[in-house]
Image (cartoon, rainbow, N blue to C red):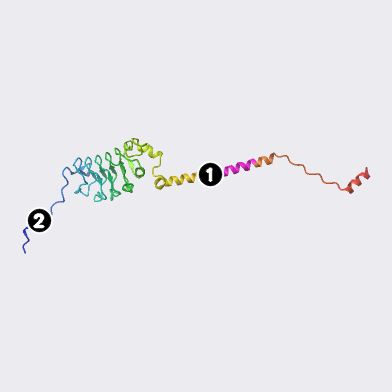
């Protein structure tokens, strides 16, 4: 039975002249794969991308998506890259990260660059389980509890801490200030999250201090009372009464 002409044309487009399927989808324009210092690298710098591209080889270890127009990173955007170690998302327009943006990278990702974007806040869940060194500088941070929690999860890239500055959406008294000194002085999460343990510790210390003060007061009173007892003069014992018979005998003898 002969195939319809339309089906035959589609089959010829899929199967190459050698009788095998055509190669996977080509990378977007401006992207290319290369070997850099022995590492499989995929570069899409300044490629005009507005979404995370497809067609990234799954053996990529270093991925550069910097200087594009990426506004968000969806859940599982890189989970098909099982050996990815370095990810550069700097100099985009990122304003949103999914809580599962880096799902699947917990065992491999070591370096993450999120600098020079539009991030005001990020979900803590996006960084849970990651053992990474991250650059968070040059973003308009709200300097909120979420950022404070993130900084407890990750290590900052050397020299980038001073670039984490509170943006226009932060509390008025924090705008323009470096966040790291503030985070070390003030608990922004309150008693509900990171501050819960600290509040409990403070309450425990106050309680212990109160008990110690009571014990100290009791001991001081006890010592003072003993000193007073030792300072009092001893009372002489009262004389024994003389019986009348003895008195009469004594008179006769005299």
Magenta run includes residue 80: no
Q: Which residue is mark 2?
A: 10
Q: Residue at x 57, y 44 (%)?
A: 215
Q: Say which residue label 1 marks.
A: 210
Q: Which mark is residue 111?
A: none
Question: Measuring 48% from the left and 46% from the top, which residue is drawn there?
Answer: 204
What percent of the width, then of the height, locates residue 246? Answer: 89, 47
Residue 17 percent location from the top left of the image: 8, 53
Residue beneath the point at 69% across and 40% down: 230
Q: Earlier in the sequence, mark 2 or mark 1?
A: 2
Query: Local crowd at mark 2 within 10 Å, few (<14), some, or many (≥20)?
Result: few
Displayed quadrant of residue 147: top left
- Residue 53, x across and y down, in percent: 20, 47
In the displayed structure image, the side of residue 213 where residue 132 appears, left or right: left
Question: Could you tell me how far apart the alpha carbons at marks 2 and 1 are, in whole angstroms?
Answer: 84 Å
Magenta highlight range: 213-224
Crowd class of label 1 (few under 14; some 14 to 19; many from 20; radius 10 Å) = few
- Element type where label 1 sits in the image: helix
Magenta highlight: main SS: helix
Q: Nearer the viewer, residue 180 or 55?
A: 180
Q: Position of residue 165 (x, y in %)?
A: 33, 37
């Amino acid at each position: 039975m002969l195939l319809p002409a339309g089906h035959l044309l589609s089959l010829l487009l899929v199967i190459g002249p050698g009788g095998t399927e055509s190669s996977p989808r080509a990378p977007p324009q401006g992207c290319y794969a290369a070997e850099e210092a022995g590492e499989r690298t995929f570069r899409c710098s300044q490629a005009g991308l507005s979404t995370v591209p497809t067609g990234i080889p799954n053996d990529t270890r270093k991925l550069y998506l910097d200087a594009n127009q990426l506004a968000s990173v969806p859940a599982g955007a890189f989970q098909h890259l099982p050996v990815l170690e370095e990810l550069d998302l700097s100099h985009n327009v990122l304003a949103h990260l999914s809580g599962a943006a880096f799902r699947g990278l917990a065992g491999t990702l070591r370096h993450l660059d999120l600098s020079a974007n539009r991030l005001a806040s990020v979900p803590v869940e996006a960084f849970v389980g990651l053992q990474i060194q991250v650059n968070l500088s040059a973003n308009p941070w709200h300097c909120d509890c979420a950022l404070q929690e993130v900084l407890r999860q990750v290590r900052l890239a050397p020299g980038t801490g001073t670039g984490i500055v509170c943006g226009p959406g932060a509390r008025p008294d924090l705008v323009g200030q470096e966040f790291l000194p503030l985070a070390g002085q003030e608990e922004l999460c309150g008693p509900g999250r990171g501050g819960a343990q600290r509040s409990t510790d403070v309450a425990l210390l106050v309680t212990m201090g109160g008990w110690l003060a009571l014990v100290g007061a009791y001991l001081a009173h006890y010592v003072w009372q003993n000193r007073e007892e030792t300072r009092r003069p001893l009372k002489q014992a009262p004389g024994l009464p003389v019986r009348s018979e003895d008195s009469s005998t004594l008179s006769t003898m005299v």
